[in-house]
Amino acid sequence: MSGTVVPFAHHPDLELVVDPGLLRVPEIFFDGARLDRPIAVVTDDYVRAASPRVAPIAVAS
């Protein structure tokens, strides 16, 4: 998908990492390849499907 950040790692050499803060929200939203079409996913479902490594990558503001 051109122009978007996909929520899954589609290449075997690319590790998917998410911040632990992601696990504190009930659902997350992704760009559906159009700015007017976000996709909502239950966070637990996303983690189960994507199997990301959870590690601190964001700084709280």
Image: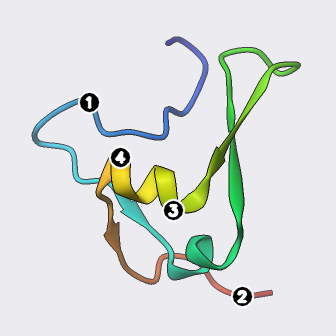
Q: Are marks 1 and 3 in contact (CB under 8 Å)?
A: no
Residue displayed at 58% across by 59% down? 43
- Residue type at the position of mark 4: Ala
Q: Where is mark 2, residue-wise? A: 60
Numbered tag placed on residue 10 in the rendering: 1
**Distance from Cα at disc 1 to Cα at disc 3:** 20 Å
Label 2: state its secondary structure. loop
**How many other residues sit within 10 Å of disc 2, few (<14), some (14-19) or many (≥20)?**
few
Whole-percent x and y of residue 49?
A: 35, 46
The image quadrant that residue 33 belongs to is: top right
* Disc nearer the start of the sequence (1/3): 1
Q: Where is mark 4, residue-wise? A: 49
Callout in the foreground (2, 3): 3
Q: Are marks 4 and 1 in contact (CB under 8 Å)?
A: no
**How many other residues sit within 10 Å of disc 3, few (<14), some (14-19) or many (≥20)?**
some
Q: Where is mark 3, residue-wise? A: 44
Front residue of 24/58: it is 24
* Disc nearer the start of the sequence (2/3): 3
Residue displayed at 48% across by 40% down? 7
**Distance from Cα at disc 4 to Cα at disc 3:** 9 Å
Label 1: state its secondary structure. loop
Q: Is residue 14 above or below residue 52?
A: above
